[in-house]
Amino acid sequence: MNNIVLHNNDDIAYTCINNTFIDEYMPYANGSYVKVYLLIMRKLSDNCKDISISNMADSLELTEKDILRALKYWEKCGLLKICKDSSGTIRDITVTRPAAKSASDNINVIIEPVRKTIKKDKYSRTYTMSEIAEVAAEPDFSWTINIIEKYMEQPLSPSDVELVVFLYDNLRFSPELILYLYEYCISHGKKSSKYIQAVAINWAKDGVDTVEKAMQYSTRFESDYMSVMKAFGLSQAPAPAQKDYIDSWLSMGFGNDVILEACNRTILAINEPSFKYANGILEKWHKAGIHTLNEIKEADLAHVSKDKKEPRKNVPSSKKNSFNSYTQRNYSKTDYTTLEQLLNK
């Protein structure tokens, strides 16, 4: 990949940022926190001595709570020193020189308290109140909860908060990935904690650990899995056994269009959704080397042509029943004449 050359072609003022901050602190911080830090540095470079939480929130289009969380975060990282008065109001902020640390040290500074509460079972969701409180003390966690409540359009219940702890702690989801998870589920009309947890566990088991991977996974899930469920008239996500069937069909080399054709034929044949029946159709096609819709069409035509050429077996015109099981009598013309004369007497 070609390098991009940067040029400076104007004479306007610039804000200097310590390279240590860019290299070792910025990559691990929430984007909103970085914006707050940069704004503070901008005000200092402009020799601005007065700044307020509300003005910062207006400038960055954030809430005042977002600003306070960011300040607390950078104080914890050692980049700011914050002094408060007796009422708890921030009166003074001092910017300190970022200490050079390795990337692993920075990660430990930010998330080490969370690692103390990891459970033996990665997919367990049982926490004590102290464990929930310990995770909830993380600045990123509080920010995530705030955004989720906006998505859900209601305050989170204790069970909802516990789910976020599970995602943040056990599954090791980043705040950005957690927010995308909620956005994805809510966009599909699903706000249930059980549904959100099930989707998250599927992502974790399939190695989805970034927003980019989640976007790719959700696109594939819609096309490969949910399309099959819709073809069968089912609205829920596939159960593990159903997912295994679909995975096996994909591993055979079938495209989504051929799989849906097998599902449609299943419904027409037995009038009910059956993964086992559809599997039989697809396995038959696979053994015959049929993997495209055109090949299926050709096979259907060949089958019809074969039926027309084969002579039909001799089938009795009628079967014996209660009306023709007795021995038939044969009458001559003379017999009919005699019977007629007897009737006329």
Image: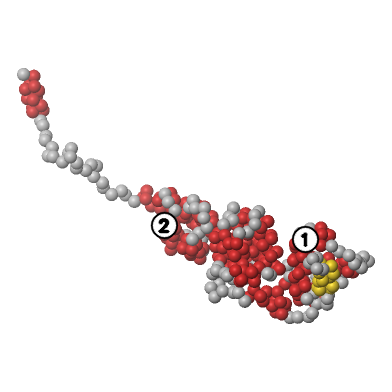
| Of residues 88 and 60, the one drawn nearer to the viewer in this rendering | 88
Say what secondary structure mark 1 lies in. helix
Q: Which mark is residue 277?
A: 2
Percent across and percent down for residue 326 are 13, 39
Instruction: Please name which of the two marks, 2 or 1, marks the residue nearer to the observer.
Output: 1
Residue appearing at x 60%, y 62% in the figure: 158
Q: Which residue is mark 1?
A: 64
Q: Is residue 341 above or below residue 225?
A: above
Q: Classify residue 186 by image quadrant.
A: bottom right
- Asked if labels 1 and 2 touch by Cβ distance under 8 angstroms, the answer is no
The residue sitting at the right extreme is 11
Residue appearing at x 50%, y 59% in the figure: 238
Q: Which mark is residue 154?
A: none
Count every numbered label the image shows and give the total: 2
Question: Can see residue 34?
Answer: no
Percent across and percent down for residue 18 are 83, 75
Tag 2: Cα neighbours inside 10 Å, few (<14), some, or many (≥20)? some
Tag 1: Cα neighbours inside 10 Å, few (<14), some, or many (≥20)? some
Q: Is residue 321 above or below residue 65?
A: above
Q: Is residue 79 above or below residue 332?
A: below
Q: Quadrant of the C terminus?
A: top left
Q: Is residue 146 above or below residue 94?
A: above
Residue appearing at x 23%, y 45% in the figure: 316
Q: Is residue 236 left or right of residue 140?
A: left
Percent across and percent down for residue 337 are 9, 24
Please name the amino acid that badge 1 sits on. Answer: Glu
Residue appearing at x 46%, y 63% in the figure: 241
Q: Quadrant of the N terminus?
A: bottom right
Spatial separation of the CA atoms under disc 2 and disc 1: 59 Å
Please name the amino acid that badge 2 sits on. Answer: Tyr
Q: Is residue 303 left or right of residue 41?
A: left
